[in-house]
Image (tube, helix red, strand yellow):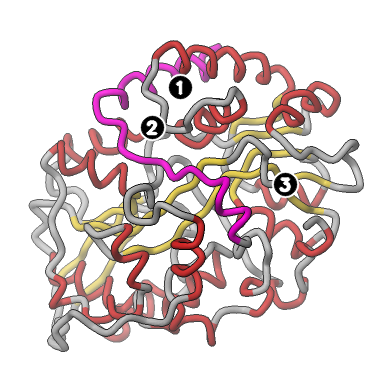
Amino acid sequence: MGDSDNLDCERLTGVTLSRRQFLKRAAFVAALPSALALAEACGSSSPSSTASPSAITNPVGQAILLNYPGWIGPDELKDYHAKFPEATVKMNTNVPTTLSGYVQMVKNNPGAYDFSLGDNSQVDQAKAAGIYQAPDWAAIPNIKNVSESFRKAYPDAPPNDYGKIIIAYRKDLVSPAPTSWADFWKLAPKYSGKVTVLDIDRDTLGSALKYLGYSGNSTDEAELNKALEALIQLKPSLQAISSIDVAKGLAKGSIVMAATFDFDVALGAASNKNVTWAMPEEGAVAYLEGFYPIKGSKHLDVVYSFLDFHLDPKNYASFINATGSAWVMPAAEPYIDKAILDAPSLQPDPAIVAKVEFEKYLGAATALWTKTWERFLAA
């Protein structure tokens, strides 16, 4: 698994990523209950269209997209405006680091945002907060290009990407090679100052829960307190709690071990063949996300036309090529860089997928997770 992660550097030269000041992500849980279901989703052909061919042809105005830095095709906003001169999409990347804070920010600023990146969990919380707008699918006919399994798994908006939290490490600098979260915790003091975890509550707390043998979606206060204790134990060894430039740090060697996204491994390995990964024996948490409209937007015609534009296979492939994320659209594969298509960390076999637990909406326990995360940051 390690050596096979080495990508063709030239094919990924210039690929950049500044993903996630925050995010919680998603649940295949009910829709894809087995590893085989996800494997089918990854490789299935495009479904027949259920949308009307009548996409919006003359959108007017400016829509604000709440998103993360770099989480878009590099020329996508410019190309959209070139196609629709009377419409623009502007990104707002100033987001908090907790799910509840994210949704509350949107709720407290009515009219400030028109659509947002978010996973199933966030969409469900947006519904509870009254800020979710069901899409007009007839205005987004390119939804036909997304795999049916992903559409069923993320039914409330166009799906965009998915991924899991794994152990990334430098095989030339870390010994013995970690194979579990238990190894990650054990090795961290040895490599103190060169270890990172993500600044995302669901992903890092979820990984600590998996380390302890609990569900990554636990709502049990005692289990969360034990996960907090484990993270506080880990904290003195951390260089940073951050989602920014992890791949770059791994490639340079300033980071030698990280609990991070699968796409960070692919991006890091593109620059340094010694960047590799392990699927923890205890399992891993994962997300599925997309772009959902926000209730009260006065520019839904721009939102829908942009989503349809984004789901054009070539445009969507530019997003994948820019971010190195795992994709949800087989129709885009002819335009995706081969190095990304072939990256094992992005396209795992069913045995790997079987160890994944997808994040889901926590309901009332969201506040408990937020409080626990804040205690960790303050420790």
Q: Earlier in the sequence, mark 2 or mark 1?
A: 2
Asked where in the image residue 288 lies, by quadrant, the reply is: bottom left
- Against 371, residue 165 (above or below) is below
Percent across and percent down for residue 111 are 13, 49
Q: Is residue 289 left or right of residue 195?
A: left
Quarter of the image with the N terminus is bottom right
Residue found at x 60% / y 20%: 231
Q: Magenta includes 377?
A: yes
Amino acid of disc 2: Thr
Q: Mark number for residue 278? A: 3
Q: Magenta includes 50?
A: no
Distance from disc 3 to disc 2, alpha carbons, whole Å, reads 27 Å
Residue found at x 60% / y 31%: 241
| Magenta segment boundaries in residue numbering | 350-379
Percent across and percent down for residue 330 are 46, 79
Q: Residues within 10 Å of mark 1 (few under 14, many from 20)?
A: many
Nearer to us in this view, 131 or 79: 131
Residue found at x 77% / y 53%: 276
Percent across and percent down for residue 308 are 27, 77
Circle 1 residue: 373
